[in-house]
Amino acid sequence: MSQVPALEVDNLTKKIKGKQIIKGVSFTLVPGEVFGFLGPNGAGKTTTIRMIVGLISPTSGTIKIGGKNVRTEFTEAMRHLGCIVENPELYPYLTGWENLEHFAKMDRSIPRSRLDEVVTLVGLTNRIHDRVSTYSLGMRQRLGIAQALLGKPKVLILDEPTNGLDPAGIREMREFIRQLAREENLSVLVSSHLLSEIQLMCDRVAIISKGAVLRTDSVQNLLAEQERVIWKAEPLPLAKQLLSEETDVTEGADGTLITLYNEPLLPDWNAKLVKRGVRVKEMRTQLPSLEDLFLEVTGGESID
Amino acid sequence: MINLVRNEMLKLLRKKRLYVIILIIAFLVPLFTYAQFKEIQEQREKLGNQDWRTVLQQEITDTQNRLSSSRIQDEWRKYLKIRLSQQQYYLENDIDPRAPGAPTFMRIFVENSIDLLLPLLVMVIVADLVSSEASGGTIKLLLTRPVKRWRILLSKYLAMLLSVSFIVLSVAVLSYGISGVVFGYGGWNMPLLTGFTVSGDELLTDHVHIVPQWQYILMEFGLVWYVCMIVGTLTFMLSVLLRSTAAVMGIMLASLIAGAILANMVASWESAKYFFMVNLNLTNYVSGMATPIEGMSLGFSMSVLAVWGIAGFIIAFVTFSKRDIY
């Protein structure tokens, strides 16, 4: 963590008509990591992202992209940023190539050769000279990423990148994002309300709800905390009774028992069961889904 | 900046709006040419071999007769009186005010389209310049580039200037080119009178002088361009303020038409002269027509328009650079 952060958000707030929409959001992205921004609809994900990309001015707090303040050094900060905010809305009456040319012309530091590079990178070579109005959603999504990558940014911000994609497209997008982070040392900020997506794609996650960040941690850490052990044993009632003397036990759906994972004590529990004649058939640890975790952290706030 | 303006022009061209405008003009000009042609033909038929002087004399007598009627309104009487002295001036100086020819058609065409048709065409181009980016969501991509917001808006404004100039130019070229087929292309040097000033119900001829028609047309096109610029700037402002192109068009259309209606009935409501839409008929000052409200002059109307234009420009730029985009 000694590197200069690619993106630094510090104590960001936004007040709209006297209502506090964002209440002091802070987080940092290091180069090469994929950071997930997780929260239910209306939690403030998009508002925060719009403040980061300079579309909305924050009420207070600072945002630095590659060390440049978005408010005071807008042009320099934007040079390090590529983004898709919500849907990749491009000009439908222009071809894909013209769209890219259009955005490339807005930044003098982008050489012409970069256009070919990004087109190849997102795999749109065959259709790039067709009008965008004839593109499928997946192709628009790719063109959107191509335009975001034009300026060789340090930070890529993708708001709901897998929205509207089919399962194959989602998988492809996920691998593409991971590849970008790995090979180009790009920091990627991904927002989503799809927990499974974030879990598979991201290194670290911030859980946001009602305008505040509830937790920020690596996916492993978050999940490890909630790691459980699944027991399969006979006879079940006896096993349950013995285990409940030691720890909390819940009964699983298919004749299993679930306890918390506690590494030092686990062998003792097992020995106790065996001593009392319980036949332990299976013992395995299970990571909970991020979904369980999310519900726990946000206190069961609805998510779709 | 040149690159940004080029981008805007590319988008304008790809939206095919300019072609539509040219098509509209190219469709309307033959229509009016035919109407004008029919009118001249009918006049000729009516007159037989009569000299235009006799006709003008007749018109003068006609106007005098109408003036002597007691049932006409004061405003109308005022206008007729002015018209009468103008006609008499033409006759005394041996000038045929209706001599046909493409330049004359051009002149009449712009004089009649300055307060409604041309502003409408300008509106069609400008109305969605900014609002379409907002409603299409592309504004989010446009404003997250390493370019300051005011520069992006300025590039759009410059593109607006270019396309408005293009509209005015194509009106000139098309009306000349198409009507010339019927009326012939001559008549650039026909002498015309200008410098009429209206004071009260009198047409003052103190400053009246003769200019060749080409100079007169140049003057009028300058004014037409100015009016189009102001209408363009105001539409531009609305386009920044509103997300919906339909709303921009609606508001502009309503105010332009209101202007045309107001001009006929505001003579006694003096402060109405500060509305921009009552001041659009700048060419009337050149040809010496009565103003809708007393105390209006070319300088006055141009200043009123300038104030509206500058205000619109400032509002557009301030809102655009400060606004939160959701």
Image (cartoon, rainbow, N blue to C red):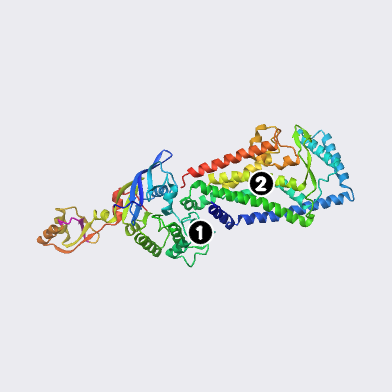
Nearest the eye: A131 or A6: A6
Tell me where residue A61 sits by quadrant. top left
Question: Residue B189 bears which disc, if any?
Answer: none
Q: Position of residue A15 (x, y in %)?
A: 41, 41
Q: Amino acid at mark 1?
A: Glu
Left or right of residue B188, residue A152 in this image = left
Check the image and name the residue furthest to the left.
A275
Q: Write down the region rendered in magenta.
A: A255-265
Question: Residue B225 bears which disc, if any?
Answer: 2
Magenta stretch: dominant SS? Answer: loop
Any part of residue B28 in sight: no
Any part of residue B175 in sight: yes
Residue at mark 1: A101
Badges 2 and 1, same chain: no
Check the image and name the residue furthest to the right.
B49
Q: Does residue B178 show up magenta in the picture?
A: no
Give me the residue at 74% from left, 50% from top. Answer: B106
Left or right of residue B81, residue A246 in this image = left
Tell me where residue A258 sits by quadrant. bottom left
Q: Position of residue A72 (x, y in %)?
A: 42, 44
Q: Does residue A259 show up magenta in the picture?
A: yes
